[in-house]
Image (cartoon, coloured by chain):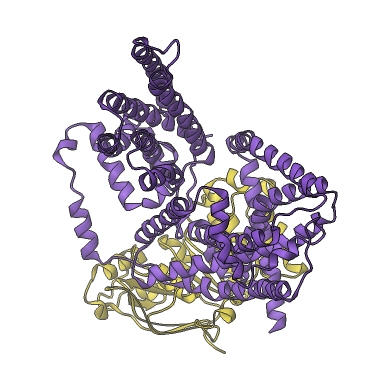
Amino acid sequence: MPAAIETEALTKTYGDVTALSGLDLSIPQGTVYGFLGPNGAGKTTTMRILTTLTDPSGGDAWIEGDHVADRDAVVDHVGYLPEQPPVYDELTAREQLSYLADLRDLGASARDRIDPLLERFELLGDADEPIRTYSKGMRQKTALAGTVLGDPDVLFLDEPTSGLDPRAARTVRDLLAELAAQGRTVFLSTHVLPVVEELADSVGVLNEGRLVAQGTPTELEHRAETGTERGLEDAFLDLTAELGHPGEAVLED
Amino acid sequence: MAGQLARDLRHGVHIATVEIRRSVRAVLASRRQLMGIALLLVLFSPVLFSLLSGGYALGLRFRTGTDLPVVELLRPQVVAWIGSLSIVFGLRALERAGDADHADLLLTLVRPRAVVTGLVLAEYVRVVAVFGSPIVAAVAAFALGAGTPLMIPVAVVGVLPLLALGLTGGFTLGYLVRLGYRRLGWSNPSGAWASLLVAGAIIVGVNVFAPSNPVRLLEALAPLGAVPVGPYADLLLVASPVAVTVGTPSLVAAGIVLGSIPLLFGATWQLAPVVWYADPVTSDGTSVRARLSRAAMPSALAGRRVTRLVWWQWVRGVRAPAQFVHLTYFLFMAFPIAQLAVSNPRSPIMPVFVAVLGAFLAGGTFGLNPLGAEGSMLPAVLTTPSPGRTLVRARILAGTILWLPVTLLGVVLTGWYSTLGSVNLAYVLVYAIVLTGFSSLLALGLGAFAPRFEAVRAFGGVEAPTPTTAALLGHSFLTTVVAVAGIAAVFVPVVIDAPPFAGGSAQLVRAVGFLAWATLLALAAAGCYRYTVARLDGYTYE
């Protein structure tokens, strides 16, 4: 069984700027992978490469065994929620989901999921209102519903709980846990560390384009060199402060 | 393979359907946009009426045939239409039509060629609606006049492939240009500037060098009739009173037209993903820092809040030039200037044209979208002390400081070179100042009345909150009306040698008339100022 996400020495440069440097990942199917890093660390670049939206400058990457150069094959596996929720202001939530179902060639059973999804995200009452009248949180929920509608094998989510109230954030966390239990892989980029602590099976910390730590949340919290129990937030702050000495901080499985 | 193609085409149709639905809803949802369209229809209804009545009258004349060499005249025009449409849609592809909203979403759902198909089909429907409808209406009027109604379906069937060819050719051209400036390493702003310049050069060049006399224009186009697609024109005349026997050249031309459409469509399938997936051209950190260090505020502007804001308007403008894409419309104003400069550079009307163009630019550059141009900063701007007065004054100054000196210099130079005379030149200089002030305030008033908040793809894939069509056309129309009135006030009394202008009273009448014109404009400008300030000070989110 191939890994859900696999990268080897994945690199991306823009002119003289290195956005991603030699990233090696192997994420098994059914994993929730928390992808952490400060702003500008290269997280979005990584997700754009893995979803085929950006070509790497070097290295390789595979999604469910398909190389990212084979866009047609990869897009059949992935669902991507960018940081800015992609919604069409002129459509209603129901129309947007129907549209995405059309583009995914989803069958009747998937279409039958539209209303339950809208209900789950508490959007059913506004499902026939134009999205331009929605709040930020409602837009985010609509976009997320569209991402999971096609039941993709691998979900790439960039700040999925951004703009959500605690109740909606809980709904999202429950949904992600369900998806993982069903064998879906979730690649989760977020700054909300409690979400990662709660959901992630494995965590990678990216800093200045390099993977500076990887392991379970518990392993990161108990950093090897100190042996003291610390929170994920403290570990994150330590790891991302150690510029230029990433190797010392790496915890490999 | 065939199954995948069918699937992509089906997805393309879905995308086109939603794109069109979104376009229609976006218009219907905005009362201001609807008003703008209504205004456009009112403004252009005389043109449409003359097109229909002229077509009908021509049909009556042609009912029994004509001696005119219709085929010889039409063949070169078919070639010119295809070329013109390709340029227009090349610019559209550069401007906005070549990119999809939420491309990240679409490109992770379907194959790129499905997205291209959707964009091209959506544009095709818009083209048919905007260009096809008046063409068919004119042909229908002609056909009814000529008593040959069968000509209407023939024209519809004949024109649709021409529009498709122009469209696919234009999209291919647009993507090639974007690839070209990527290869040159130009970032999006640089590419947008280059594209604007090229567009301007094409528009001005065509209008300056194309003969204004229709007969000479047809003569100049005549060699195009030899291009193999020219005989396609014969097919458009089938079922008309001037129909000719369709020969092999026409069938070959039809083959070329119909064969080129899928070829060019296929080219867009190849080119668009290369553009979309290409890395953005970014400057390295050094040059960014160098640019920022060069952007130090001049001490002359640093003393007052309003002049500091003027500076920031300029800085933002230089770094995001796509917001000025609407200024290309003012190039139409440059046609008469360029034509006069070629044909009669000493014409006394030259300085007046320069004054009017300067007024257009002074108002149009920073004035036509004062609310929307602030983008996501608008809440922060609105919560500053007296935002209306400060922002309005800053935008007035940003445009006038930039354009008024250039305009006055242009008026002086062209006036000195022309046969205008010193008194008339003095009048034109004052005329330029008054018109510039009016244009600046009118632009702000209209821009505040009909703002555009959402960024649209302006040029080369760059997004910017460009002014609404209503604001742009309203400003152009009203500025033109008052400019013509001003010209009449300045020149009519001294060129008409009849009472009440005859003799010494001409100068007095002129002075009084000009003063009245300037006073009316000042009052109207003051009204615009008060409205804009009040709108900004009292702006609340709906």
Quarter holding the C terminus of chain B is top right
**On the picture, is B200 further left or further right than B132?**
left
Q: Up-down: is B333 above or below B166?
A: above
**At x 59% / y 43%, what residue is drawn?**
A133
Quarter holding the N terminus of chain B is bottom right
Q: In which quarter of the image is residue B518?
A: top left
Q: Up-down: is B513 above or below B160?
A: above
**On the picture, is B158 further left or further right than A165?**
right
Most foreground residue, B340 or B472: B340
Q: Can residue A86 be seen in this view?
A: no
Q: In which quarter of the image is residue B521?
A: top left
**On the picture, is B496 further left or further right than A150?**
left
Most foreground residue, B433 or B367: B433
Give the image location of residue B443, x and y in percent: 43, 33
Give the image location of residue A67, x and y in percent: 51, 85
Q: Up-down: is A126 above or below B514?
A: below
Q: How many labels does the image show?
A: 0
Q: Can residue B402 be seen in this view?
A: yes
Give the image location of residue B69, x and y in percent: 69, 58
The residue at the far front in this view is B67
Quick one: which chain is purple?
B
Give the image location of residue B154, x and y in percent: 79, 60
Q: Which tint was used for chain A?
A: yellow
Q: Up-down: is B76 above or below B259?
A: above
**At x 77% / y 45%, what residue is drawn?**
B61
Most foreground residue, B441 or A238: B441
**On the picture, is A137 further left or further right than A225?**
right
The residue at the far left in this view is B299
Q: Quadrant of residue B29?
A: top right
